[in-house]
Image (tube, rainbow, N blue to C red):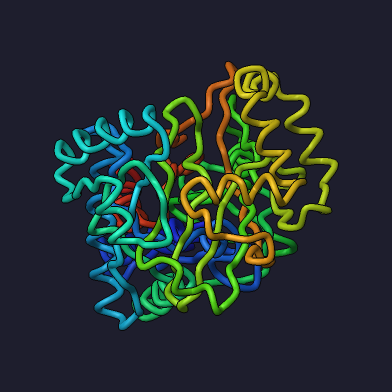
Amino acid sequence: MFDFLVIGGGIVGLATAMELLAARPGASLLLLEKESTVAHHQTGHNSGVIHAGIYYAPGSLKADLCRRGAAATKAFCLEHEIPFEVCGKLLVATSDLELQRMNALTSRAAQNGIDVEQLDAAALRSFEPNIAGLGALFVKSTGIVDYRKVCNAMLGVIRQRGGTIKFCYTVSAIREGPNHVAVAAGDEVWLGRKLIVCGGLQSDRLARLAGLNVTHQIVPFRGEYYRLPPNRNGIVRSLIYPIPDPALPFLGIHLTRMIDGGVTVGPNAVLGLAREGYRKSEINLGDVASFLKFPGFWKVIRRHWRSGLVEWYNSLCKQGYLRECRKYCPDLKLEDLQPYPAGIRAQAVTATGELVHDFLFMTTSRMLHVCNAPSPAATSAIPIAQMIVEKSLKT
């Protein structure tokens, strides 16, 4: 019997396993991952940004976790010689309304203890000659990293501390008894005194598999990216984001420098027709049927149908996608938008049609299920894991 079983080889699952072994040296731990590598889904398909936490309400758990997570991620990278760069992020206002929202973000940054600098149009053009706007907010501490490399380093730490990792095992049953939890995959069964499930895109299904009363559902949203050609990699020196609309759940299309020297454009947010379908043509009928039968999905659609139609149009029409980019980067051309892999966001939706933006845990005496780890979970993974470990060891 293992002291700990962990399901999920994304960054939250790996960080949790790593922190469990730090909290209980010498404990036995088994991590199960259904894919052949770590960081196969959400972690390996994100923008690679180390966020500063400017968007979150002052004093909130998300603001605190993001700020601490950014520092912990950078420290982990230094310790394990993982390349990262603190290049900063510009939030660019392109209308009077966005200028008002930018001023509110400036106040929020001060309350969150985040160092920012406000730029007028002339200072913005001087700082980023290829970016146009009425003004901008420069978030100095934002960085970039390859989270796959972070995850592989975490994998090494887990093994060094005595943990065991098994790949290509899809969990088929979870049963909690008075003294242990049994987890089955294929013909094998493992027993653990504690189980932590970090299932990401499959988190609600794994919770139901464990017999929990799950009232929310994961609805997948595809984030489609493009990559600029190499001769355009110098178009920006920092990350370029629009000022977010507080009425919308996603941040909008942005220009992101990557640690390999390239620049991506995106992501948008389009309803996904498969939880793990990264190509536009991929459809999983079971996934589609599950959200079509869920009442909360239709309530979300009624609330956000206008923005949803815009996202679909821009997904199907590259010209529409380009128009969104040219609001702040007018020099971009259609031929600059070259193919790049999409990502999938696991969006938890309640039965009343609310998009869950906070952490969502389900617990029993021997299990903890991470049902929602909100963006930016990759940046915040280490303190999120410490919080999970604290919760798990209390029960």
* 161 lies above or below 45: below
Looking at the picture, how far across and down is residue 92, in whole percent? 37, 46
Q: Which of the 4 quarters of the picture holds residue 289?
A: top right
Residue projecting furthest to the front: 122
* 213 lies above or below 223: above
Say left or right for 131 vs 109. right
Placement of the C terminus among the 4 image quadrants: top left
Looking at the picture, how far across and down is residue 389, in whole percent? 32, 51
Say left or right for 204 vs 391. right
Residue toward you, 163 or 295: 295
* 345 lies above or below 293: below
Name the residue at 67% across, 48% down: 173
Name the residue at 53% across, 59% down: 331
Looking at the picture, how far across and down is residue 174, in whole percent? 61, 47
Say left or right for 324 vs 247. right
Residue toward you, 208 or 298: 298
Looking at the picture, how far across and down is residue 271, in whole percent? 69, 39
Q: Which of the 4 quarters of the picture holds residue 258?
A: bottom left
Residue toward you, 54 or 381: 54
Name the residue at 48% across, 62% down: 1
Name the residue at 55% across, 79% down: 231
- Does residue 191 appear anywhere in the picture? no
How many numbered marks appear? 0
- Does residue 387 appear anywhere in the picture? yes
Residue toward you, 260 or 95: 95
